[in-house]
Image: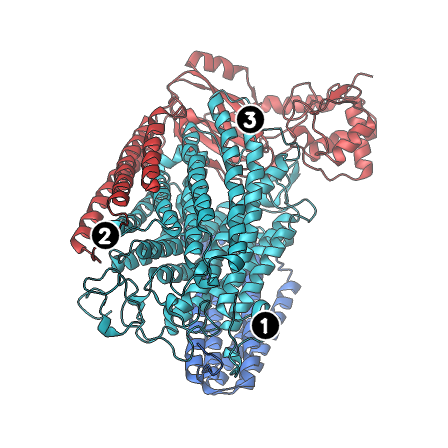
Amino acid sequence: MAYVIPTRPDDESHHAPQSFWTRYVWSQDHKVIAVQYGCTAIAVGLVGLVLSNLMRLQLGFPGEFAFINAERYYQFVTMHGMIMVIYLLTALFLGGFGNYLIPLMVGARDMVFPYLNMLSFWFYLLSVVVLIASFFVPGGPTGAGWTLYPPQAILPGTPGHDWGIIVMLVSLLIFIVAATMGGLNYVTTVLQARCEGMTLLRMPLSVWGIFTATILALLAFPALFVSGVMMLFDKVLGTSFFMPSLVSMGQLSAHQGGSPLLFQHLFWFFGHPEVYIVALPAFGIVSDLISVHARKAIFGYRTMVWAIVAIGGLSFVVWAHHMFVSGMNPYFGFFFATSTLIIAVPTAIKVYNWLLTLWRGDIHLSVPMLFALAFMLTFLLGGLTGLFLGNVSVDIPLSGTYFVVAHFHMVMGVAPLLVVFGGIYHWFPKITGRMLDDRLGHLHFWVTFLGTYAIFFPMHYLGLLGMPRRYHHFTDYEFIPASAHAFNAWITVIALIVGAVQLVFVFNLLWSAFRGRKAGPNPWQAASLEWATPETPPAHGNWGRDLPVVHRWAYAYSVPGAPRDFIAQDAPSKDGGAEPAYGGSP
Amino acid sequence: MAIAVVLFIVVLASLLFHWLTPWWVTPLASNWGRMDQTLWITFLITGIFFAVVSLVLVWTLWRYRHRAGHKAAYEPDNPRLERWLIGITTVGIVGLLAPGLVVYADYVRPPKDALVLEVVGEQWQWRFRFEGADGRLGGTDARFISAENPFGLDPTDARGLDDILVSGNEVHMPLNRPVHVLARSNDVLHDFYVPPFRARMNIVPGQVSSFWFTPTVAGRYESMCAQLCGVGHPNMRGIVVVEPEPAFRAWLGQQGTFTAALAAAAAAKAKAPAGGNPLVDQGRALAGAKGCVACHSIDGRTIVGPTWKGLFGKMETMDDGTTARVDEDYLRNFIRNPTARSVKGYPPVMPKVELTDPELDALIAYIKALAPQ
Amino acid sequence: MNTSAVQLQAPDEATRERALSAGLWAFLVVVTSLFSLFLTAYVMRLSSPDATAVEMPRQLWISTSVLILGSLMMHRRQLNAGGACAMGFLVAQWWAWQALQAEHVVLTGNPAASFFYLLTALHGLHVAGGLVAWANVQASPTPGRIAMCARYWDYLLMLWIVLFAAFTWITPEVARVICGVSP
């Protein structure tokens, strides 16, 4: 990475960093912070990947690996889930993509609070360190499942009920502080630091997705904070927020009167928006990938913005679809099934609009486009299976089975992760000035897409059969045929292969950063503003002496009469390519 | 173009898999066929959307792939088309939701004349309770739970005295009669799940949750716990037997009542083994207080772990094939470090129980006393 | 491109303060979310049979008055007085805790008490955080930044009044009515 340092640095907020430490470690530059977030997230994601492979070894070949006993299995399950959802996907989309793209896409020099931005990364790193530390405390990490339900999470019988759960909760509280610091930055920058001409409705959908997800994060993470603090109090200080009167391992507990369902309501009030915190940036980014690589304006831009905002808003009123069989007041089921199925409408519109963007486009099958297409198929599937689970009476026999596991992996694990990969292949030349290797990219794509599809598509049917999730073994069940056990073994093999190919990706990242084919400033011929920086990679301050001025939206592709098939966002107004008129200025 | 071909194959293979899959819902054994019907409607509607959207995608990729001289159109939006698509989608959504809610309206209203069955979950076994002749279940509370009273019944509540108590993970129910399951937990969240019945519900300590169904096919069904409840979660298994009413009555008649259980506990206390040995007595008290008896019986039957009757002095085989004699050292090491070894035939789920050294001595003395000298 | 001559313009104070103000509003939204969720949990938990009302110690009237005074001082640009009042508030809250402890109202055993300690502690932490920002503002006390302190002080005052009202008026009996639980 080359950083050009002005010879006359100015005041502290735009002081170009000088030493190695201030340039690459204690940096307040959003681009450096983004890469720090990205590297940390990918590293911890690899840990999560290894954990999933260990789980699969036990499920595919039960009993063959004696060290994966029941305790460890549940610890792996829990840590895998928490790492992937929070420490990988959330951190990568908001802290990684958000930090890198927002200032560049809106024409700002940096985030509005660079010092706070830097702090947010170091708090995130601290939360990761604390999380990993739970492997080394007495009793090991918690094995309560990523959902951490009380009362079991803090009672004997569940691994890590002494120390692991405390360390996990502390790590989450630190992460929430980090996410809040970052979130304040992203929101304020989008609202305040857009360059001249960059109205909200001229921002690319990547920004809309990340911006809306950030608002969700600011409003929803407090619910996790509330439930985490109250569970910590129950464990460490003996309160009874969530702990009813009970007898555990022969001992009458000191707690009484608490409500385990209160925890679930709070957790899922956070947990459902959380999945949209992961999904909305993916929606935004994939819209841009499709548009750029099909040389066609995103179809229905305003509708896409409306859909992102509507999905964000609705995501706060669907949470109890995770609790249809929880034992809550059964009449809540009517409301939450209805709200959940309503949220399917704006989501479906987005799928149609991606398809309509491709329709009559000029589709270049680059590696980013391949990942975007695979996203469309896997998200279509994952979203449709959500309709099974959202419909309360269909959910009743399927809840707690592999149908749920297959659904959330497909819609949250596979689909957004494909967008992460696509986005990295797309913006890597911007970040480093070099292209990722194309052949390795194709290898990575095909194995990842086909492998994950082969794992999670058939898994839905194991759920229909009634195989419960979070089982360490399935020996001697009359209703489970031998084919299911054989399939479990096959999934394990495929999972190991998919896991191995991610190392190819990591190798590609590292090798290409130094030896990749040099890219020009705009190898994809994209119109959005981040490609128009004077330097590639962008220098500190991004834009040189003068901030850009923008005259159109970010999707002026294949405009009739234009000399090339795209018009940059900051090209002079006379070049045309204005966004469609909507009867009133945006 | 490989992507278009591959996507086409993947979509076709997915649809084919659906038709050929060896894994499908278990044969229905209850009245909730309408859940299965709603499932079918959902498959139909979502299947159509899946096939149409993905095949249009495949077609689009092929038709509009980049080639020399090909240009994209400029079509940034089409409000009319958007409105149509919203309309069609809404129709599809309503087509899914309406039947689902209609079925659910029945699910939340159990029939008045249903047979009441209480299911009690506890790490990691099931117990069951039926109303006695008085047609009422007795009150319960966690503070009454003990080794002699694992249901936690209030002994001063007259309604509970004739309640029929069933331990041992197996329950029977009569064919073609609605069952209203009242679910309770002594400790953590559980879920009583029998896939052929379709109906189920999480069990929450501190409250009673419920669901209902009518078993319509006689047979033996496997019940499972479906809410992660600790390391023994996959071991929390049971059997539900659905049989004609007369056979059910006969089985029910053989089960004990709360009154009988109280009497048996009193009698057992009266003729306790090695009476007068304070160390053994202390050990017996600890076995109850520390919850050992939840998993280890003293009468020879297997609950979760090995029975203590005749345990001391026997040769035990481990999972790895080695054998060991159960002497004082073996017991001491096992209790202090339960996950260090695993006995063949038993799940490795024993929790570490807090015991001082003198307490451990007493417990070992008690276990020793349960073996023939 | 030769960037050696490039000088990046620092944002002027007005732009910076606009950004800080927007950031502060966003933060207040987050804090509102946090305490709204806590209060919802409070009402739900208080509806169970094991909750009994806690009588509020009279020290809370003193702490409330001090906090009101603090807001007034901030609005009159009296930065030092405003900060001193915030510190005084924390001291009075601590005093209130001591008074409750003397009445054997402890953290465990009664959810009303548990929530009282938890929520006053969290509110107090936010006041302490405000004092950290206040110390920063001391370094460059522009009218804009003092106005933001005033806004934050007002917010914490309003939040405190809501909490105080909840502790006083949303008793277990009221919570049971709200949740539709029969007494």
Identity of the residue drawn at 47% across and 75% down: C152
The percent position of residue A190, horizontal first and vertical second, equals 38, 69
SS class, disc 2 = loop
Discs 2, 3: same chain: yes
The residue shown at (75%, 23%) is: B322
Secondary structure under tag 3 reads loop
> Which mark, by number, is residue A380?
none
Query: Tag 3 or tag 2, which sits nearer the N-term?
Result: 2
Chain B rendering hue = red
Q: Residues within 10 Å of mark 3 (few under 14, many from 20)?
A: many
Amino acid type at image mark 2: His
Residue B91 seen from this side: yes
Q: From the viewer's perspective, is A572 left or right of C28?
A: left
Q: Which chain is blue?
A: C
Q: To which chain does the residue with label 1 belong? A: A
Residue A568 located left or right of residue A319: left
Q: Amino acid at mark 3?
A: Leu
What residue is shown with label 2?
B70
| Alpha carbons under labels 2 and 1: distance apart | 49 Å
Identify residue for label 3.
B161
Badge 1 amino acid: Thr
Q: Disc 2: which chain? A: B
Q: Which chain is cyan?
A: A
Residue bearing mark 1: A22
Q: Are marks 2 and 3 in contact (CB under 8 Å)?
A: no
Q: Are marks 2 and 1 on the same chain?
A: no
Spatial CA distance of label 3 from label 1 is 76 Å
